[in-house]
Amino acid sequence: MILVSGHQLAPSLASTGFVMPDFFRKEYLLLLAMVAGGLAWGLEPVLLAGGRWLALGSAGLLVLAIISTALRVAHHAEFLAGKVGDPYGTMILTLSAVLVEVIILAIVMNHSHSPTLARDTIYAAVILDINGIIGLSALLGGLKHGEQAYNDDSSRSYGVMILTAVSISMLVPEFIPPERWHLHSIFTIVIMILMYALFLRMQTGPQSYFFSYNYPEKRKWPRARPMHPDERESGGRTGLAIGLLVSGVVLTGVLAELMSRALSTGLSGLPVPPMVAALVVAVISASPEILTALHAAMADRMQSVINIAMGASLSTVVLTVPVVETIALLEGKPMQMAMTPVQSVMLLVTLLVAAINLNDGETNALEGMTHFVLFLTFIMLTVIGL
């Protein structure tokens, strides 16, 4: 029991470990984001009418608020993932991240005049996940641990599904006659849903060992994932985590709406490449995954890195594309989903390098460096407007 002013705190509250000062200490990022959102909502007319630089500064602060919210969403998703274990845990992590990305993308698309924003965001997210997250994680983890083991069946399964999904949704549209775009959109929606349904069945069914450490007769598996500190708390923490996760997702939508208005006002008239807005969306949604993956790599848990990065890439394509194509059908005008030649080459090279590097069940610093160099190349191409 806990004494408050001479009285015992209700056992139900004490058993959950919920103490108000402790709550504020743990959730200060979420609370600060809420305060920032409230101030931006109330002062929005002033911020938008105060000139370009005030609008861009406000957008920058709101981006930080969204990242803070996304970090707390990922934290609570990670706690829930620890409760259910892999592969369900990884599924919760990737779905929560993709949900945040879809919400931000849908809202930014509503305020952007770029017909390629959805395509560029998906492209940027896949490059960031595979080359950025896996590259940096394998590089740093390899320098610390040497070779790091993972289940090579998972990387091959992820890779072939990503290649198939990208080809159908972002390569094939280049050859679709304009008057037939409705048919291709409907076909793409159905195929993406079927692919993800089969993926979920394999990830959670009898073949779930494809996506975990525990594979029969595999060698040199790393130690089990350490228990998350919050997992030691009682079951009452689960309900609070679910509530905060949902609240964080809703807050993300509100902040994204405010950020997109400020960003649209600030960038209006500037010669900024369309890819910049797409990269902002991708970085915001991937920020929790980056931190989680780097932590896993330094703890010698490369399987978690593969599941997070490749799972997020696959989920981004097969879940975001149906949303985008549905919006296009409802609005009666097609989205420009066909990649540019530069994007096609970069993505195909990325998937080819991943197929070679992630084929033997072990990563090292050299393999990580090759992916990270491709990520730096992507940044260079973005800066020069390609």
Image: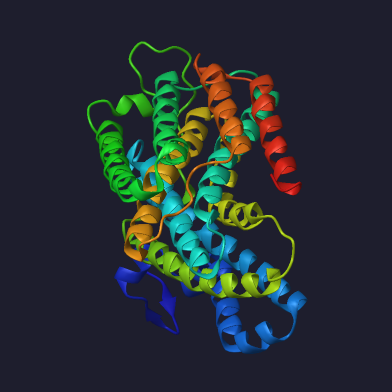
- Tell me the residue at 40%/20% (across/down): 153
Image quadrant in which you'd find residue 49? bottom right
Q: Is residue 109 above or below residue 262?
A: above
Q: Is residue 148 visible?
A: no
User: How far across and how far down the image is residue 111, in percent?
Assistant: 53, 70
Figure quadrant of the C terminus:
top right
On the image, which quarter does residue 188 sit in?
top left
- In this rendering, would 215 be left or right of 32? left
61 on left or right of 121: right
Q: Quadrant of the N terminus?
A: bottom left
x and y, in percent, of residue 182 in the image: 32, 51
Q: Note whether 217 is above or below 347 in the view shown.
A: above
Above or below: residue 366 compared with residue 200: above
Q: Nearer the viewer, residue 128 or 191?
A: 191
List x then y, in percent, for residue 93. 42, 47
The colour mode here is rainbow
Residue shown at 56% from the left, 51% from the top: 282
Instruction: Name which residue lies at 50% across and 53% down.
Output: 118
- Nearest the viewer among 169 and 303 is 169
* 11 relative to 81, above or below: below
Q: Position of residue 247 (x, y in %)?
A: 41, 69
Which sits in the foreground, 277 or 103?
A: 277
Visible residue check, residue 286? yes
Residue 79 as seen in the image, left or right of residue 342? left
| Count of residue discs | 0
